Image (cartoon, helix red, strand yellow):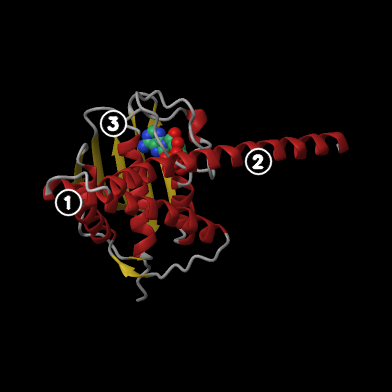
């Protein structure tokens, strides 16, 4: 037993070291692209090498949107760390899951130009107790993944509904899918499926689904996945319905 204990704790440490180094490398990759764009465009503007106001505006817009991307990533890492330590302040209120989804899609649809997103929603949902900010963030993580892990002809269907005193929102894609083996690990922090089999390398930190998990735990709900390699995936977030006191 003693030897096994030493072996398994050494193995755990090696795994942790590997996970840590992969995470640092993934984050560095994620930071590098927006930083390179920001500094290239800022330098070109500073040198006065942009000769039309339209071009200059385009460059400023890129600098702005890339800075927002960096900000979003830093927020993601900080939020995950707060949630993991139980320090994230979930501010729950009575709300309707349909309204949260409609708001998220209204605000962010322009970010997903390459994808055909449909919203088949049941607006007559029972009420739930939810922290709108973190639930929106969780939903965005799922939509983000549906876009990232799909090839051409990206079709994403978002559905809301309710069953057995639970309300749910489903995000379904026609992307690359996830093997049964990987489905067991995708909610682990930092875990990324290595062989994405996509033409371009897909960037990520491996934190998105862990954040979704922490958020659902805080809401006493759950997240489920159904997927088949090559056929697409569908993720569902379930929230308990508020019991009406008679
Ligand atoms: P990230 O996307 O930053 O790698 P996530 O925690 O969001 O991290 O996802 C973990 C892994 O799960 C991803 O690296 C990807 O391999 C897999 N995955 C998540 N969502 C999907 C999806 N919709 N289709 C296929 N694979 C997915």
Q: Which residue is mark 1?
A: 57
Residue 211 in the image: above or below residue 149? below
Q: Which residue is mark 2?
A: 16
| Residue 207, percent from left and from top | 48, 46
Q: Which numbered disc flags the more N-terminal residue, 1 or 2?
A: 2
Residues under numbered marks 1 and 2 in contact, where contact means CB atoms less than 8 Å apart:
no
| Residue 51, percent from left and from top | 14, 45
| Quadrant occupied by the C terminus | bottom left
Q: Nearer the viewer, mark 1 or mark 2?
A: 1
Q: Residues within 10 Å of mark 2 (few under 14, many from 20)?
A: few
| Residue 75, percent from left and from top | 43, 57
The outermost residue toward the front is 47
Q: Going 33% across and 57% down the picture, which residue do you hit?
A: 136
Secondary structure beneath disc 1?
A: helix
| Residue 126, percent from left and from top | 28, 62
Secondary structure beneath disc 2?
A: helix
Q: Residues within 10 Å of mark 1 (few under 14, many from 20)?
A: few
Q: Which residue is mark 3?
A: 174
Q: CA distance from mark 1 to mark 2?
A: 45 Å
Q: Nearer the viewer, mark 3 or mark 2?
A: 2
Secondary structure beneath disc 3?
A: loop
Q: Which numbered disc flags the more N-terminal residue, 1 or 3?
A: 1
* Quarter holding residue 55: top left
């Amino acid at each position: 037993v003693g030897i096994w204990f030493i072996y398994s704790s050494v193995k755990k440490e090696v795994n942790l070291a590997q996970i840590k180094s992969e995470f640092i490398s993934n984050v560095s990759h994620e930071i590098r692209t927006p930083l390179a764009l920001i500094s290239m465009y800022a330098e070109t503007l500073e040198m006065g090498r942009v000769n039309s106001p339209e071009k200059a505006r385009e460059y400023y817009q890129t600098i702005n949107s890339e800075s927002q991307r960096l900000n979003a990533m830093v927020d993601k890492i900080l939020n995950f760390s707060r949630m993991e330590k139980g320090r994230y302040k979930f501010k729950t209120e009575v709300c309707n899951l349909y309204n949260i989804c409609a708001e998220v899609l209204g605000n962010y649809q322009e970010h997903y130009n390459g994808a055909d997103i449909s919203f088949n929603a049941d607006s007559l949902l029972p009420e739930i107790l939810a922290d709108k900010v973190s639930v929106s963030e969780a939903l965005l993580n799922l939509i983000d993944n549906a876009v990232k892990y799909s090839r051409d002809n990206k079709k994403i269907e978002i559905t809301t509904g309710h069953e057995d005193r639970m309300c749910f929102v489903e995000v379904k894609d026609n992307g690359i899918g996830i093997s049964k083996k990987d489905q067991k690990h995708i909610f682990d922090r930092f875990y990324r499926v290595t062989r994405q089999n996509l033409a371009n390398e897909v960037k990520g930190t491996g934190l998105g689904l862990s954040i979704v998990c922490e958020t659902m735990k805080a809401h006493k709900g759950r997240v489920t996945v159904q997927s088949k390699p090559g056929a697409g995936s569908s993720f569902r977030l379930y929230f308990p319905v508020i019991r009406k006191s008679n």
